[in-house]
Image (cartoon, rainbow, N blue to C red):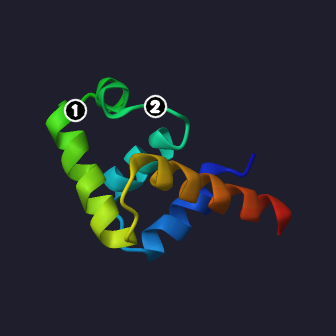
């Protein structure tokens, strides 16, 4: 698997904040919003706000689409 920093840099070019990038990377591991909240030590509401912001910035509408998008980015890095 690609080192996270490569995917993080690509997500940054989309305008995602460091916190949003962290949420997106954890979502890509198959975690739900409640699990993400526990992992990052923030409230479920904060994670939901990050997900809304990620959706607004990427045009993706579903959490599963965010996960798939990040995984595709990682796979593209593996083939480069």
**Residue pictured at 33% horizontal, 71% vertical:** 57
Where the C terminus falls, by quadrant? bottom right
In the image: residue 8, left or right of residue 38:
right
Q: Nearer the N terminus, badge 1 or badge 2? A: 2
**Residue pictured at 24% horizontal, 56% vertical:** 52
In the image: residue 25, left or right of residue 22:
right
Residue 56 or residue 42, whichever sits in front: 56
> Element type at marker 2?
loop
Q: Quadrant of residue 6?
A: bottom right
Q: Quadrant of residue 10?
A: bottom right
Q: CA distance from mark 1 to mark 2?
A: 15 Å
Looking at the image, is 72 positioned above or below residue 46?
below
For the residue carrying disc 1, how many other residues have a C-alpha within 10 Å: few (<14), some (14-19), or many (20+)?
Answer: few
Which residue carries the number 1 mark? 42
Please name which of the two marks, 1 or 2, marks the residue nearer to the observer. 2
> Element type at marker 1?
loop
Image label count: 2
Where the N terminus falls, by quadrant? top right
**Residue pictured at 64% horizontal, 62% vertical:** 73
**Residue pictured at 53% horizontal, 66% vertical:** 9
* Residue 8, x across and y down, in percent: 52, 59
Residue 21 got which mark?
Answer: none
* Residue found at the far right of this picture: 79
Residue 18 or residue 65, whichever sits in front: 65
Residue 31 got which mark?
Answer: 2
* Residue 11, x across and y down, in percent: 48, 66
């Amino acid at each position: 698997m690609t080192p996270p920093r490569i995917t993080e840099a690509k997500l940054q070019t989309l305008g995602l904040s460091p916190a949003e990038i962290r949420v997106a990377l954890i979502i890509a591991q198959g975690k739900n919003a409640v699990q993400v909240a526990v992992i990052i030590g923030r409230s479920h509401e904060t994670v939901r706000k990050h997900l809304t912001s990620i959706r607004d910035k990427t045009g993706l509408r579903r959490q599963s689409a965010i996960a798939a998008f990040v995984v595709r980015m990682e796979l593209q890095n593996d083939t480069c």
